[in-house]
Amino acid sequence: MFEIEIKARCHDKNSLIEKIVSAGAVHIETREEIDMYFNHPQRDFAKTDEALRLRRIGEKTYLTYKGPKVSVKSKTRLEEESGVESFDSIKKIFLIFGFVESEKVVKVRSIYHYDKIEICIDEVENLGDFIELEIKSEQIKEAEEHLFNIANSFGLTDFIQKSYLEMILEKKST
């Protein structure tokens, strides 16, 4: 199963929220997410286009592996995720094994469901506002087409294939 995702900049977040809600999107929740990314001691994930992430949402923690992107149109990649008991314990284990903290991404995420799609409106610390449309599928081309059709119906145009981590690292290097 692949995570097929498209992302765009939000130039007018409130107007966009009105559009998606009037189209029938249902607000599920708004939450803060703190993502800590790690790099492998002998394999540079920036070069292999992989990611290893610990995500804290309130008291819950998730460990996620993201494989290399497999599409030039969207951020489609293999994703494996599992809940873990302790953010701090897993972080310590990674550091003991030589993993290095890459960067932290902090965001407030408002989640909506629409037509089997998860829509996230993200306020990303030091980056701004974004919208992500995501679906899980094995039919990549069909899913991409569906996501872009919905994005077009919302008036989205400023699409980005980079992850928040990539954007933050780029911003820090300039």
Image (cartoon, grey):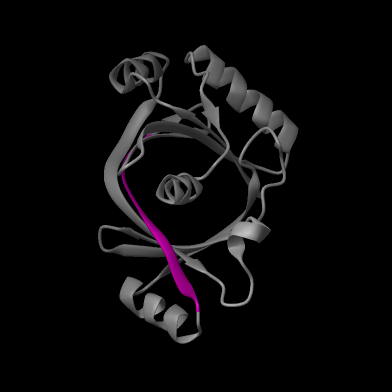
Q: 81 or 101: nearer the eye?
A: 101
Image coords of residue 37 (percent x, y): 45, 62
Which part of the image, by quadrant, shows the C terminus?
Answer: top left
Q: Is residue 44 left or right of residue 32?
A: right
Q: Disc count in the image?
A: 0
Q: In this view, does 25 lie above or below 165?
A: above
Magenta region includes residue 107 = yes
Instruction: Kindly identify the residue that appears in the image at 59 percent across and 27 percent down.
Output: 147
* Residue 50 in view of the camera: no
In the displayed structure, 170 sits above or below 36; it is above
Q: In which quarter of the image is residue 9?
A: top left
Q: Can residue 20 be seen in this view?
A: yes
Residue 103 percent coordinates (x, y): 41, 60
Q: Give the range drawn in magenta.
A: 99-111
Residue at screen point 60% across, 23% down: 148
Residue at left 37%, top 21%? 11
* Foreground residue among 5 and 159: 159
Residue found at the far bottom of this picture: 96
Q: Quadrant of residue 34?
A: bottom left
Viewed as shown, does residue 128 lie left or right of 68?
Answer: left
Give the answer, above or below, for where 75 lies relative to 16: below
Q: Where is residue 169 in the image (x, y as percent from the top left)?
A: 46, 51
Q: Does the magenta stretch include residue 118?
A: no
